[in-house]
Image (cartoon, rainbow, N blue to C red):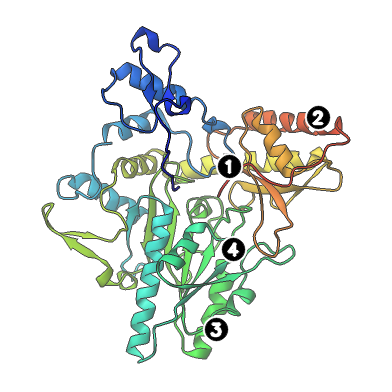
Amino acid sequence: MLHGKKNLSDTDPDSMLTPAYGSRSISEPVPKYRMPEQGLPPKIAYDLVRDELMLDGNSRLNLATFVTTWMEDEARQLMSETFDKNMIDKDEYPQTAEIELRCTNMLAKLWNAPQDEEAVGCSTIGSSEASMLGGMALKWNWRKRRETQGKSAAKPNMVMGINVQVCWEKFCRYWEIEPRFVPMEGDRFCLNAEEALKLVDENTIGVVVIMGSTFDGRYENVKEVNDALLELNAQNGWDVPIHVDGASGGFVAPFLQPDLEWDFRLPLVKSINTSGHKFGLVYPGVGWIVWRDKAELPEELVFHCNYLGGDLPNFALNFSRPGNQVVAQYYNFLRLGHEGYRSIHQASQNVALHLSSGIAELGPFQLISDGSSIPVFAFTTNEKANFSVFDISNKLRERGWLVPAYTFPKNREDLAVLRCVCKEGFTRDMADMLLLDMQHAIDFFASQPNHRPETKGSGFHH
């Protein structure tokens, strides 16, 4: 998020912090937007910051975020002990580097990387960076193919559903790629093979298919796109690949839908990204990307640094970053194993299905999805409601619940929905409390027959 400079004088009351207990230790207010001339005692500084953060929402009641909001004490302890380890310093912290290697191997196997190919991967600061690394590899490989054929590489494009996360729009803008969006139509809220292939041509660097849309939690049909694209490639002599955005589903499908073919079992899936800090169950921020074979990662994108000691092959958009999230990811892999992840995600999905069915039974709502892909679902109001989704979102905020309300993108901007992300730490009991508060909200609006529904939200973002 970009922030502008505040031009406030020190006499403006909005420019200063004046703690209520400050007279016990400090007698002067503390500036907000410039560094104070003198430092503060650690306890005072701590209390000042802590008190301001009390105004943030309660993360355990946040059904807007996909990001992990609870970890075990042992995981928190490990993260605390490794805050100071720089992930880039692989020569100085060789065991942290070894742990990253183990994690990428575990993910490659989880996603069925072929035995006869040499999968490669790395951790990132989040799934958005992982997506951009995957996109860069697609562009470089496409350009290399075009140059080998003696053809122009001046107009690359990428095909994806309009429901992609904003990181893909950023990728296309930053790397000068034409985004070709499959629009929503009617009750089709994501990309399908028929519509995607209408946009594919010889300049398409790849098709992005989403495992877990942020809009409604649905899986897109990767196998359908793979099979149709294989046929189109064969007809035209093309080599258009698939990148799977598994930011959410990459840590869900292997455990809850193990027979679903979406990963490296499909030949055109060349790379997969995921968020360790979503259903990987790690605090933010850590992401992962794996390529099915090292040939899919162009060597010219890899930098070899030796000034930190040793040869450090590196492919990233940033350099220094904390290693403790990678350590926490490895902790989860050891602590939970396959069965542990399955059990936790099954419990979250059971809560999602319980909550979505309960919402449908309330009366004024219609489900858009029910949480049967990833434990995420969306719903809207129906003709029985004298309120909007924005009204419900605002009313639930009064009780501490953060349930986002937003409109769908182009072609379905008429559809406004609420979304619930059910993660570990959000229990069935909490779901029942939310249902009770939703019923109270319905009753409140029923008592206001002249209520005019809100048509805008309060600033939730994907």
Indicate the secondary structure of the residue bearing disc 1.
loop
Q: Viewed as shown, does residue 227 lie left or right of 4? A: right
Above-or-below relation of 318 to 241: above
User: Looking at the picture, how far across and down is residue 2, in whole percent?
Assistant: 44, 48
* 284 or 43, nearer to the observer: 43
Q: Amino acid at mark 1?
A: Ala
Label 2 and label 1: CA atoms lie apart by 23 Å
Closer to viewer: mark 2 or mark 1: 2
The residue where tag 4 is placed is: 220
Label 2 and label 4: CA atoms lie apart by 38 Å
The residue where tag 3 is placed is: 231
* 23 or 303, nearer to the observer: 23
| Disc assigned to residue 48 | none
| Disc assigned to residue 444 | 2
Q: Earlier in the sequence, mark 2 or mark 1?
A: 1
- Write down the quadrant of residue 37 in the picture: top left
User: Looking at the picture, how far across and down is residue 179, in whole percent?
Assistant: 51, 71
Q: Earlier in the sequence, mark 4 or mark 3?
A: 4
The residue where tag 1 is placed is: 64
Label 4 and label 3: CA atoms lie apart by 19 Å
